[in-house]
Amino acid sequence: MWPAIFTLGDGQFSFTLYCTQYTSICLFKINVKMDFNAYLTRIGYSGPINNSHAILKRICELHYNAVPFDVLGMHGADRIVLNLETVYKNIVIDHRGGTCYEVNRLFQWLLRNFGFQVDIIQCQWFNYGEFSPKFNHLALLVSFVFMVCNTSTIN
């Protein structure tokens, strides 16, 4: 019967092959157990898990120093696959870097696990007086809620 689905794995991650009558592999999906603590180990973080400004600053510094910006895969035979599980495997398990689309998407997942409100935004570089093409870069926007409290009243 077509299509056939085969899943192979060792517990840490598995591969699912979707096969059809006309091609041996029409879609390759990787199912990875995404481990928050393994990601923290990968970037060298140990500390409290909360959404404070100080922790955001610390994990940004650690991530920047541990996970390199890497575009070499774009120029070789590697396909850039942007599903979160594949990006996790490449960066956390295989200790690779990635493009802004890969690194920032995975970092968004990490920040949300810390409790941050994070949105992906489209960006452009500004070099030598000109903007790069649209959708040339991806960045994260972390929102904080600030409140002004007044504990005194005038009677």
Image (cartoon, helix red, strand yellow):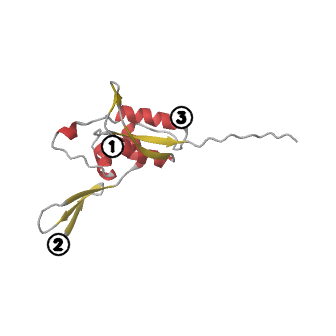
Residue situated furthest top in the rendering? 128
State which quarter of the image contains the N terminus.
bottom left
Q: From mark 1 to mark 2, how far is it between C-alphas?
A: 34 Å
10 Å crowding of disc 3: few (<14), some (14-19), many (20+): few
Mark 3: which secondary structure? Answer: helix
Say which mark, if any, is on residue 9.
Answer: none
**As drawn, 12 above or below 142:** below
Say which mark, if any, is on residue 2.
Answer: 2
Q: What amino acid is at disc 1?
A: Tyr
Q: Residue at x 82, y 41 (%)?
A: 153
The percent coordinates of residue 102 (x first, y second) are 32, 44
Q: From mark 3 to mark 1, how far is it between C-alphas?
A: 25 Å
If you read the primary sequence from the N terminus, does the residue marked by circle 3 or circle 1 appear first? 3
Q: What amino acid is at disc 3?
A: Ala
Give the labeled residue for mark 3: 54
Q: Nearer the viewer, mark 3 or mark 1?
A: 1
Image marks 3 and 1: residues in contact by CB distance under 8 Å: no
State which quarter of the image contains the C terminus.
top right
Residue situated furthest right in the rendering? 155
Give the labeled residue for mark 1: 101
